[in-house]
Each structure stands twice: as structure tokens, then as C-alpha cells.
Amino acid sequence: MTIAAKPASARRAVRIWLFSVAALIALMIVVGGATRLTESGLSIVEWKPVTGVLPPLSAAQWQEAFEGYKQIPQYHALNAGMSLSDFKTIFWWEWSHRLLGRVIGVVYLLPFLYFLWRGALSAELKRRLWLIFGLGALQGAVGWWMVASGLSERIEVSHYRLATHLVLALLIYAAIVWTMRRLTERESSGAAVRLKMTGFVLLGVTFVQLYLGALVAGLRAGRVYNTWPDIDGAFIPSATRLWFDTPWWRNLFDNTLTVQFEHRMTAYALFALAIAHALDVIRSRADAAAISGALWLVAAITLQATLGILTLLNQVPIGLALAHQAVAILVLTLAVMQAERLASRQLESAPHQVAAPLGQAG
């Protein structure tokens, strides 16, 4: 049966499109992590949204790009005397990251316009997808805002801006996964209000943990205090070490010990909350999907915590660090799915809430 035959087919096409976009965003986040870990993020010192899609194509263009990099503080502090061949290595990481951003924009916008033209989207779904598109456009600007912070007075980007850039990418990803789930035809979960609330709390704590992880990455805080379960000689470091900076709140964002400690404690809290949620779902005799979702979330958080410990103990090798980041995306995916599953009201799945089938636009 053709896609024009019934609204369900239109929903399926939209789900496939959103899944493709989400997969590309996940890939871009991992490539972004590799770009940071290889100190490649400042290798392209200009923002050219259109012409920048092409890399240097001649020896003269490569030399021009290299000379631009030589003008920023990072080159003199970290890479003075590097060869053109070494520069190309870091250039390709950053260029690939930016290219993926452009590809995601095209893969999102063109099918979106097509679905609008064919009348395949309800009014509510259109508003939601336009909002996601706006966040994507903002993400491009935030990315350059982040890079610009490392081009003049610093030798690396601001960890505040790095965390903002990553969390916005994850927010867009989560919004797409949530929307994709809402297009699935199924019965409402009928879950208790308590379970719905803990599902959202789990999702919220997951975002907090991801933000703290970005601060750890931006501060290179994973390369210090490489012991576990103790940190700086104790399970809970001394207050004078945690709060030595003034005003006190700056320690929460700028003190490498405090930021790593926050990241560890939030991981413990997330793990405990996930287990409590799973036990509550089982005791409440929720449906099989909710129980399965809760157990998968516990398993993913356990794996993520294990990778985090191994990454720390080994002083952040690239392979383990990227695995840690990839599983973080998996944890977020499962947290979004569980929260949406428990809160499900079938916002987009009922036939009357889908616009005309793709072949019946008018």
C-alpha cells in the first residue's frame, strides 16, 4: 500500500525521518567529543556557513588555513612548530564536525518542507517541529559563539560555552526522540502520577548530569583526581578544598575538584533513583513496556557509570572517553522514552490529529 493510502503511513514516514535526524545528531555529538579530545576544535578560525562546506582544495588554500591557525593563542601554547600534515589531522576533525551540522540541517529542513507541502502534519506537530528547527538554527550560532571564545585570549574554548553547546544539542535530540515517540500508535500507559513524576525527575537529573559532564570535559577535570571511590584522598573532600574560590558559587563551575565531585555525586544519585524507579514500576504492576523501560535504563546507567570510572582511572583515553559519551546518549534516549511512555496521552497518534495523508494535500 502506498504512503498516500492512510494517515498511519504518513506517521510512519515522519517517524523514519525523525529517526534519521536523531541518529545524525547522536553521531555529531560523538564526533564533537572526538574533536574536543584531539584538541581540534579551534583549527578552523572562521565561520563560513555556506562556503565553509568545502575544505581547502589546493596547497595554497591549505597554507592559508594553517596560517590562520598560527595566529591564535592555542597554536603558540600547544602546537608551536607543528607540521602542515599535523594541522590537516586536526582540521579534518573540526571540518567533519561542521559538515555534519550542515548535513543535519539539510536532512531536517528538506523533508520537513515536503511534509508541510503534502499536508502530512497536524497543527500541533508543525508547531513542535518549527520549534526544533529554531533550536537547530540557534545551535549553529552557539557553536560559533563557543569557538570564538578560544580564538583571542584563551588557548581553549570556554567550558561554560562548551556545556551550553552540548546541552542544547542534547535538548534538540531529546525533543526529536520525544516527538518520534508521540507518533507511535499505542494505548495510554495509565501509569500512576507518582511514576510519571519520577520519570520526569529521572530525565531532569540526567540532563543535570550531562551538563556537569560537559563542565568536566571543558575543564579537563577528568585528567586529575584519578582515583575511585575516593577523590583527593577521601570519599568527600574537605570543605576548604571544595570551596576555596570566592564567591562560593564559582566553585560549582570553575573548581576542577568541585565539578568532578558534583559529577560523581550526581551519578550516584541518578543510579539510586533509577533503581528506586524500577522497583516502584514493578511493585505498581505497570505495563510490560514501562517495566522493561525502567530495567533497561538501570542497565544503561550501570554501564555508563562503569565506563566513567574506567575513563577516570585511565586518565581519559580517547576510546573510553568516546564510549562514555556514546552511552550517555543511550541513557538520555532511554530516559526520554521512559518519561514519554509514562506520560503518554497519544498527542499525535490518534487518526483525527494527523493531517491529510501525503497524497491528499489541499
Image (cartoon, grey):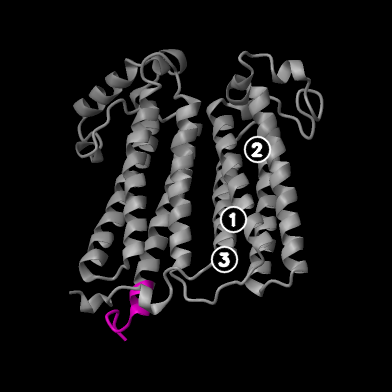
The residues bearing labels 2 and 1 have C-alpha atoms spaced at a distance of 23 Å
Element marked by disc 2: helix
Task: Kindly identify which numbered label has been placed on residue 341.
Answer: 3
Amino acid carrying mark 2 in the image: Thr
Span colored in magenta: 1-11
Amino acid at the residue labelled 1: Ala
Q: Position of residue 296 (x, y in %)?
A: 66, 61
The answer, for residue 135, to whether it is visible in the render is yes
Q: Nearer the viewer, residue 40 or 162?
A: 162
Q: Is residue 103 magenta?
A: no
Q: From the viewer's perspective, is the residue at label 3 or at label 1 nearer?
A: 3
Q: In the orientation shown, which residue stands out farthest toward the bottom?
A: 1
Mark 2 lies on residue: 311
Disc 1 marks which residue? 335
- SS state under label 3: helix
Amino acid identity at mark 3: Arg
Instruction: Give x and y (percent) for residue 41.
Output: 41, 30
The foreground one among 281 and 257 is 281
Of the image marks 3 and 1, the number of the one nearer the N terminus: 1
